[in-house]
Amino acid sequence: SFHEKAVSRSGGIAAIISISIFFVIYYLLYSKILYEYIFISYSMFLIGVIDDLKIKVKPFKRLLIMILMLFTFIYFFQIKILNIDIPLLEFIYNNHFFSSIFTVLCFLFIINGANLIDGFNGLLSLNLIIINVILAYINLENANLEFSLLIIAQIIILLSFLLFNFPKAKIFLGDSGAYLMGSLISLNVVITNNLNPEISSFFFCTLLFYLFFEVFFSFFRKIYLKKSPLEPDNFHLHMMVFKNINKKYNNEETSNYKTSIIINLSYLILITPAFFFKDEALLCKIWFIMILIVYIFAYYRLTSKLLLNDKN
């Protein structure tokens, strides 16, 4: 709706073809089939395709299908978050069922967060590139070379997509691409967390805070406003940033990509300090809480500014 002409949402198709080619290359190099990546990412892609093809499925039904598919594959492939810096949740280590439920919830937040911010030029792809670059660095530093190659392949795919999505958008990932890349980033973080137990799990929470908190904050904001938390609206943080920028420049196309730059630059500034104390659990917990407070303050500051401008 922010573009003069309709923009294709077929980026997900290009992404699934690209990642499929890499899965074949990975098999030829290491004689390994990445079953968990293939089943989870392909299933999330197919759920997104339904919406991209304008096939009407109620949000609750789509969410239920997503939950069932994620739980099936996470439970079957025994995907667990082994390193959790919350003593109260330690019981899930010994209970596969509860561990799977917890992991499904984590995946849901990130996958839906990715879908939520797709639509502004470069907003999602830039955020995913930043996350993957940090994950690749951590794994390369700790000699997880085979896994690093998987992440680097995703960075290349995202950079290639960015050429057609930023600053002017010729294509978007769509629901299929957002769900696909959201599921890939979720798996990347879980596996990196498990391969590097010396790093606090709250560092990875910090790394994913924007994708996670966009969904979390939006869910409770809508409930407070007595709206359906599953129905979309235009009062998310990136919308507030866009509206404030557009008030100043009165140019939707320019304001669109500037929104992506401002949000991702702010995101990078907020997460960078945590990288230097990523192995200190207490500091990572404190920093994670602090950036959530910054998010809430920024949101209400931007909202108040818009309301003030409207009154004037």
Image: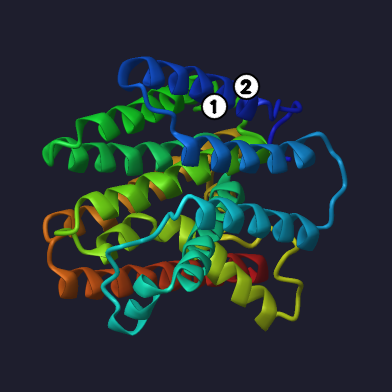
Which element type, helix, strand or loop, lies under badge 1?
A: loop
Q: Nearer the viewer, residue 77 or 205?
A: 77
Residue type marked 2: Lys
Residue at 36% x, 61% y is 81
Q: Quadrant of the N terminus?
A: top right
Q: Is residue 272 left or right of residue 234?
A: left
Count of marks placed on residues: 2
Q: From the viewer's perspective, is residue 241 above or below residue 297?
A: above
Q: At 76% from the left edge and 75% from the top edge, which residue is drawn?
A: 227
Image coordinates of residue 183 in percent, x first then y, are 51, 45
Give percent across and percent down for residue 158: 45, 28
Question: Sequence order check: which comes first, mark 1 or mark 2?
Answer: 1
Dot 2: few (<14), some (14–19), or many (≥20) neighbours within 10 Å? some
Q: Nearer the viewer, residue 250 or 26?
A: 26
Q: Secondary structure at mark 2?
A: loop
Q: Position of residue 204 (x, y in %)?
A: 30, 58
The answer to whether residue 244 of the structure is visible from this angle is no
Q: Is residue 194 visible?
A: yes
In the image, 72 versus 190, the foreground residue is 72
| Left or right of 32 on screen, residue 14 | right
| Placement of 154 over or under 199, stated as above or below | above
Which part of the image, by quadrant, shows the C terminus?
bottom right
Q: Which residue sits at x=44%, y=55%?
A: 78
Q: Which residue is mark 1?
A: 165
Q: Position of residue 20 (x, y in %)?
A: 52, 22
Q: Which mark is residue 170?
A: 2
The Cα–Cα distance between marks 1 and 2, rounded to whole angstroms, is 6 Å
Q: Image point 53% across, 53% down: which residue?
A: 76
- In which quadrant of the rendered view does residue 148 lie? top left
Tell whether label 2 touches label 1 (CB within 8 Å). yes
Q: Is residue 150 left or right of residue 305?
A: left
Q: Amino acid at mark 1?
A: Asn
